[in-house]
Image: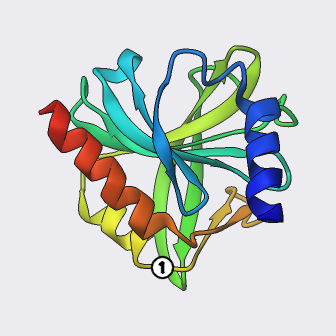
Amino acid sequence: MTRLLALTFAALTATSALAQDLIDKGFVEGWNIMMDPALGNGCLIQTVYQDLSVVRLGYDALGNRGYFAVYNKAWGDIKQGESYPIRFDLDGKSYDATAIGFNERDVPGATVFFTDRSFVNAIAQNKTMTVYNPAGEVVMAIDLKGTAKALDYARDCQNKKL
């Protein structure tokens, strides 16, 4: 219960500017289920971590692709539209990717787009995701607990939109 209250408080304080255009669809296993009208009513899951990083995993219905996005007010050095080579590690399996920098209502972040739907399954089936910068330094480590169940709800949300 304390974790839920802390996450809810953090979500309200860290994402109030980010979530203004999102439509709430519920809360499952520590993740908010939402729909984003700006992305063709694509459904997504979102959570907030202790460092106030906001993490989203969702579907861009306009681009027919998935995405993983991370926002954090402390990341002031990320530039809108710039490409950043990164590496994900999902419980020991590595993926190279390019993140695109953005600034969402004065909160910097980065998004990785992907078209391989098996990547979402890989995320759901693992326990942790670690993200590394080009120098091999850890940018963040994410506990994926509850992600599989939340993604099931997001899939149901998306299927109702198709």
Q: Is residue 17 left or right of residue 67?
A: right
In the rendered image, the residue lying farthest to the front is: 1
Residue at figure coordinates x 28%, y 20% from the top left: 40
- How many marks the image carries: the answer is 1
Residue at figure coordinates x 81%, y 42% from the top left: 10
Secondary structure under tag 1 reads loop
Color encoding of the figure: rainbow
Q: Is residue 147 above or below residue 17?
A: below
Q: Residue 5: percent from the left, percent from the top?
A: 79, 52
| Residue pointed to by mark 1 | 126
Q: Residue 44: percent from the left, percent from the top?
A: 42, 41
Based on the displayed image, in which of its 4 quarters is residue 14 positioned?
A: top right
Q: Nearer the viewer, residue 129 or 40?
A: 40
Q: Is residue 41 left or right of residue 97?
A: left
In the rendered image, the residue lying farthest to the left is: 162
Q: Quadrant of the N terminus?
A: bottom right
Res. 125 visible in picture = yes
